[in-house]
Image: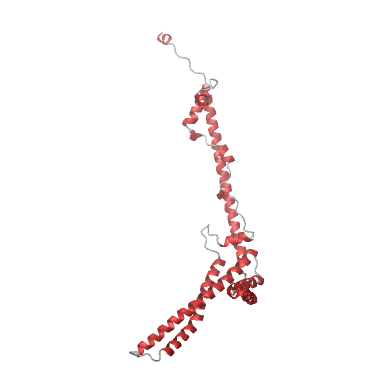
């Protein structure tokens, strides 16, 4: 029954109104939906940018690569320090290990007979290389893990609190020392934390002093860069907002012009029809 009423025409509808409705169905592009554009919310791309003012926002900003940027300087510094620590540990543990392995090989190979002096020297060098790799690897990953854990904790605290304090480096040293002495039980973990905290203070003073030689610390540099980036994003957001307002104004103007055209069409359709011409009068 409802579908029947929808298909039936209203007898009170005038002929001009039916022609207007037919015109709208034939030419829908002439009338843009201006009211929908005015009431619709702004897209997410036009949202107002937020300034990373909280600790977690600054932490997430370190790993933000949405705008095509690379990882922050803090993250790259932690990775570089880990690589450098691995190389230092490899050399520090590998050289004594190679010397010890060579001496041990010579001591254990006194009774062996070689066909030539070159073969004996080559065997001793091979033993030294094996000792270098074995002992160098043991020191390399330990030193790299120690340095990366210390830098990660200290950098995280400094970024979260947005300040450089020697206490953060002491806490990082205590955490690192406790983790590395965890296998010795609670007493060893406590002793490692105390020693790590004491060693973290001079290490933090050295890091802050080296950063201050450039005129500003890393935290001051990051704070300045965040303010500059926020200013650029605000300028871009303002420009997009003005452009959107101009587009909405143009759409509103075109909608008003279309409404005027429809009024003219209605006026033309409301004009009285011409009376039919009598053929007898024409023949006379």
Residue at image x 35%, y 87%? 119
Where does the image place residue 233, in percent across and percent down from the top left?
58, 55
Asked whether residue 222 is in view, the answer is: yes
Q: Is residue 46 above or below residue 78?
A: above
Q: Is residue 124 above or below residue 36?
A: below
136 or 41, nearer to the observer: 136
Q: Is residue 273 above or below residue 178?
A: above
Residue 202 shown left or right of residue 270 in the figure = right
Residue 109 shown left or right of residue 209 in the figure = left
Where does the image place residue 25, in percent across and percent down from the top left?
48, 30
Asked whether residue 252 is in view, the answer is: no
Residue 228 shown left or right of residue 278 in the figure = right
Q: Is residue 137 above or below residue 218?
A: below
Residue at image x 45%, y 87%? 104
Residue at image x 63%, y 66%? 157
188 or 222, nearer to the observer: 188
Q: Furthest residue to the front?
A: 185
242 or 37, nearer to the observer: 37
> Could you say which quadrant of the image residue 216 lies in?
bottom right
Q: Furthest residue to the bottom?
A: 111
> Could you say which quadrant of the image residue 219 lies in?
bottom right
């Amino acid at each position: 029954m409802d579908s029947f009423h929808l298909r039936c025409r209203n007898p009170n509808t005038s002929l001009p109104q039916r022609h207007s409705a037919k015109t709208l169905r034939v030419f829908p592009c002439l009338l843009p939906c201006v009211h929908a554009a005015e009431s619709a919310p702004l897209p997410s791309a036009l949202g107002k940018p937020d300034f990373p003012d909280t600790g977690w926002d600054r932490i997430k900003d370190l790993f933000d690569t949405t705008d095509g940027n690379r990882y922050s300087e803090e993250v790259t510094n932690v990775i570089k320090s880990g690589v450098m620590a691995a190389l230092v540990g490899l050399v520090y543990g590998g050289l004594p290990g190679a010397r010890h392995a060579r001496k041990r090989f010579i001591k254990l190979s006194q009774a062996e007979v070689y066909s030539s002096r070159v073969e004996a020297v080559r065997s001793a060098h091979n033993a030294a290389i094996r000792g270098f790799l074995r002992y160098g690897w043991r020191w390399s990953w330990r030193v790299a893990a120690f340095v990366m854990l210390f830098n990660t904790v200290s950098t995280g605290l400094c970024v979260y609190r947005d300040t450089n304090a020697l206490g953060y480096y002491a806490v990082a040293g205590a955490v690192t020392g406790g983790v590395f002495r965890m296998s010795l039980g609670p007493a060893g973990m406590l002793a490692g934390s105390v020693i790590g905290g004491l060693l973290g203070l001079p290490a933090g003073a050295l890091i802050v002093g080296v950063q201050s030689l450039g005129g500003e610390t890393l935290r001051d540099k990051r704070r300045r860069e965040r303010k500059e980036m926020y200013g650029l994003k605000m300028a871009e957001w303002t420009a997009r907002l003005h452009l959107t307002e101009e587009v909405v104004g143009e759409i509103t103007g075109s909608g008003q012009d279309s409404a005027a055209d429809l009024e003219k069409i209605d006026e033309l359709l409301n004009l009285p029809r011409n009376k039919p011409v009598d053929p007898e009068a024409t023949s006379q």
